[in-house]
Image (cartoon, helix red, strand yellow):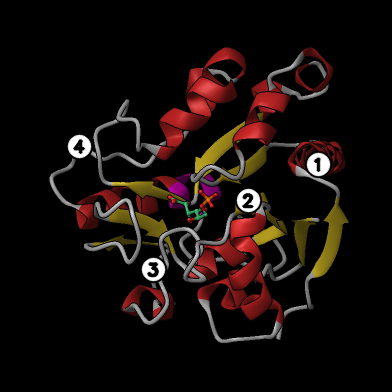
Amino acid sequence: GPPSPELVRVADKAAMARTAADLLLARIAENAGRIAICLTGGSSPKQLYELLATQAYRDRIPWPRVHWFIGDERFVPAGDALHNMTMARHAFLDACAPAANIHPIPTDTGSPKRSANAYARELITFYGADQLDPARPLFDVVLLGIGPDGHVASLFPGYPAVEVRDRWVVGVDQAHVAPFVPRVSLTLPALASCRTMLFEVAGADKQPILTRVLAGEDLPANRARSTHETTFLIDA
Ligand code: 6PG
């Protein structure tokens, strides 16, 4: 199977955001060409996103070469308070990234399935092939959080979406945890196609699920692994 994840312990959420930002910059520095970063929703990455917009980080990111995707989206209109890419836009993208480099999952298509198909086409066009080559990852970095039930992106435990291997993006009609809106999610093989998969797991409320994940329980959070390198950032 894929290499085991590296566990990196940090003091608190501020240290986690700095560590994640530094890791992101290191990966960006390793790629002199076009860079693809897959963002995540939820509350965990917000501090990281805000940090990227600060002068110290902003000046070190070659914005014209960096493309921003999202690992999952809530099926709500763009601009809604629950919309993941809107959160990232407000936190840093709108202030820093060229509009053409922001790749949201469309949610105005009428159904999660149609949105999934549209985003799959966008990813395939960007990648330049409809089969993923392990030697040429789709993303430089994939950011992920872990839900209280062990979900990642919108791949919930026991849901058929977790098993999908022949598509890059799927519609998920019902969420397993709040917010109870339909979702659109990248599949495990699409998320795995990255140089670094970076989990941010912070806060006391994550302790129960982190314990289960580290015990090796069969959860989406344990099935999501980069074909290259996976890092878990964990706070005290
Ligand atoms: C979403 C996310 C989801 C999230 C986890 C953790 O759309 O909700 O992409 O997978 O990362 O639920 O959420 P928190 O960061 O809010 O704990």
Q: CA distance from mark 2 to mark 1?
A: 17 Å
Q: What's the mark number on residue 167?
A: 3
In contact (CB < 8 Å): disc 4 and disc 1: no
Per the image, the residue denoted by label 1 is 31
Per the image, the residue denoted by label 4 is 108
Check disc 2 and report its element: helix, strand or loop.
Answer: strand
Q: CA distance from mark 4 to mark 3?
A: 21 Å
Nearer mark to the viewer, of 2 and 1: 2
Q: CA distance from mark 2 to mark 3?
A: 20 Å
Most foreground residue, 115 or 19: 19
Image coordinates for residue 19, horizontal then vertical, percent: 83, 42
Most foreground residue, 115 or 18: 18
Sequence-wise, which precedes: disc 2 or disc 3? Answer: 2
Q: CA distance from mark 2 to mark 4?
A: 25 Å
Q: Is residue 41 left or right of residue 177?
A: right
Per the image, the residue denoted by label 2 is 143
Sequence-wise, which precedes: disc 2 or disc 1? Answer: 1
- Mark 4 residue type: Asp
